[in-house]
């Protein structure tokens, strides 16, 4: 499926996009008919209700013949608790973001979402995983009864690796009993092994499905590449379509996102995907070692492992050339 997610950082830290730009954005997103599905995803705090950003986008989307899907990724703070119900009634798919220090608030927010009939999805924002025990954090997250978890890689790769492996040690026995939440980091490896696009990013590229805008309309390929020197253009001075087909974006997809020669030589490439291009070091993902451990340690025991391994490695049962298995 040809999909596009436009992440708007307009609500980031309480800052909001001006209503006129928000209106244009919702209209143009609905007009991108070359995509089977367009999602407008607002990231950050719920703004002051008087700013109306969420309502403007929802109203414009509803007026269109083919509205974009609406999503909001929110921390459980600010006026989230007073606004969640209204956002859900406006048609927003809500997910939570927070770090492991905000677990009590995440739990409260997850309870609220559940009471609204929304299965909680929690994206654990890393900051830095240093010092956090994956076993402890995972068991506390279970008390939020999430439907889906995603551990966004970040900070020191060693610390992230140690953290996520502890998480997976806890998750695996539950998964084999048919219990526990879906962990998107694993789902993405599994999907890629089955030649399907990843559901999330940061563990592997699906950059052609992403676009990010700052509240001032500056466009980047994605939230992770939103930094000086990586601008693709300015919205609404440029239309969404012209930003998507711009030389800068096509160049990013063709050059930065191309699989490197180091990854092409790796037997795990069909499953790993080579990682996020914004997080590469010396031709490999910053999390190359963690991805390798992930795949080799957790692939083998999973029931889908054999089939995917056969698909990925041409029937070989040994991960030849892998220094970790
Ligand atoms: S650069 Fe990384 S974070 Fe951005 S879309 Fe590509 S894989 Fe995802
Ligand atoms: S495991 Fe490392 S070398 Fe192999 S594809 Fe992934 S990032 Fe590239």
Image: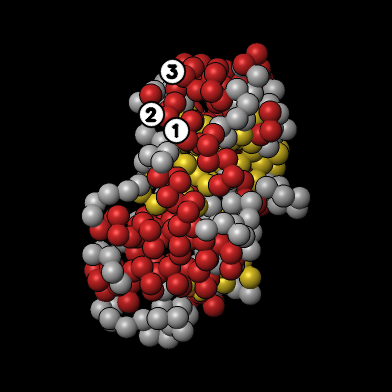
In this picture, residue 122 sits left or right of residue 315: right
Position of residue 141 measured from the top left corner of the image (x, y, whole percent): 45, 45
- Are the residues flagged by discs 2 and 3 in contact, CB closer than 8 Å? no
Callout 3 environment at 10 Å: few (<14), some (14 to 19), or many (20+)? Answer: few
Residue at which label 2 appears: 114
**Residue at image point 34% right, 64% down:** 193
**Residue at image point 70% right, 42% down:** 233
Cα distance between the residues tagged 3 and 1: 17 Å
- Are the residues flagged by discs 2 and 1 in contact, CB closer than 8 Å? yes
Q: Is residue 314 above or below residue 51?
A: below
Sequence-wise first label, 3 or 1: 3
Asked which secondary structure carries label 3, the reply is helix
Q: Is residue 4 above or below residue 185?
A: above
Specify whether residue 234 is in view.
yes
**Residue at image point 56% right, 62% down:** 160
Residue at which label 3 appears: 89
Sequence-wise first label, 2 or 3: 3
Depth check, mark 3 against mark 1: the one in front is: 1
Specify whether residue 58 is in view.
no
- Disc 2 under 8 Å from ligand 1? The reply is no
Depth check, mark 2 against mark 3: the one in front is: 2
Asked which secondary structure carries label 2, the reply is helix
* Labelled disc at residue 110: 1
Q: Is residue 172 above or below residue 18?
A: below
Residue found farthest to the right: 228
Residue found farthest to the top: 50
Cα distance between the residues tagged 2 and 3: 14 Å
Q: Quadrant of residue 18?
A: top right
In this picture, residue 251 sits left or right of residue 118: right
Asked which secondary structure carries label 1, the reply is helix
**Residue at image point 46% right, 73% down:** 292
Position of residue 252 measured from the top left corner of the image (x, y, whole percent): 62, 57
């Amino acid at each position: 499926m040809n999909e596009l997610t436009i992440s708007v950082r307009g609500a980031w830290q309480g800052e909001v996009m001006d209503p006129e730009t928000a209106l244009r954005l919702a209209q143009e997103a609905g007009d991108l008919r070359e995509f089977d599905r367009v999602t407008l995803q607002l990231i950050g705090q719920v703004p002051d209700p008087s700013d109306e950003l969420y309502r403007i986008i929802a109203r414009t989307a509803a007026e269109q013949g083919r509205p974009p899907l609406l999503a909001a990724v929110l921390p459980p703070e600010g006026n989230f608790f007073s606004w969640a119900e209204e956002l859900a009634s406006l048609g927003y798919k809500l997910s939570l973001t927070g770090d492991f220090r905000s677990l009590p608030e995440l739990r409260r927010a997850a309870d609220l979402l559940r009471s609204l009939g929304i299965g909680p999805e929690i994206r654990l924002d890393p900051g830095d995983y240093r010092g956090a025990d994956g076993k402890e954090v995972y068991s506390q997250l279970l008390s939020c009864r999430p439907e889906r978890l995603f551990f966004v890689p970040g900070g020191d790769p060693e610390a992230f690796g140690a953290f996520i492996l502890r998480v997976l040690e806890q998750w695996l026995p539950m998964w084999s009993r048919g219990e526990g939440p879906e962990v998107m980091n694993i789902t993405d490896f599994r999907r890629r092994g089955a030649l399907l696009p990843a559901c999330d990013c940061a563990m592997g590229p699906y950059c052609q499905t992403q676009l990010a805008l700052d509240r001032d309309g500056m466009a980047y390929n994605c939230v992770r590449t939103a930094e000086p020197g990586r601008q693709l253009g300015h919205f609404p001075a440029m239309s969404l379509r012209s930003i998507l087909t711009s030389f800068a974006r096509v160049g990013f997809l063709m050059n930065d996102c191309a699989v490197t020669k180091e990854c092409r030589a790796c037997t795990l490439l069909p499953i790993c995907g080579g990682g996020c291009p914004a997080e590469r070091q010396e031709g490999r993902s910053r999390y190359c070692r963690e991805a390798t451990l992930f795949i080799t340690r957790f692939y083998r025991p999973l029931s889908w492992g054999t089939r995917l391994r056969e698909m990925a490695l041409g029937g070989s049962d040994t991960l030849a050339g892998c220094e970790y298995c």
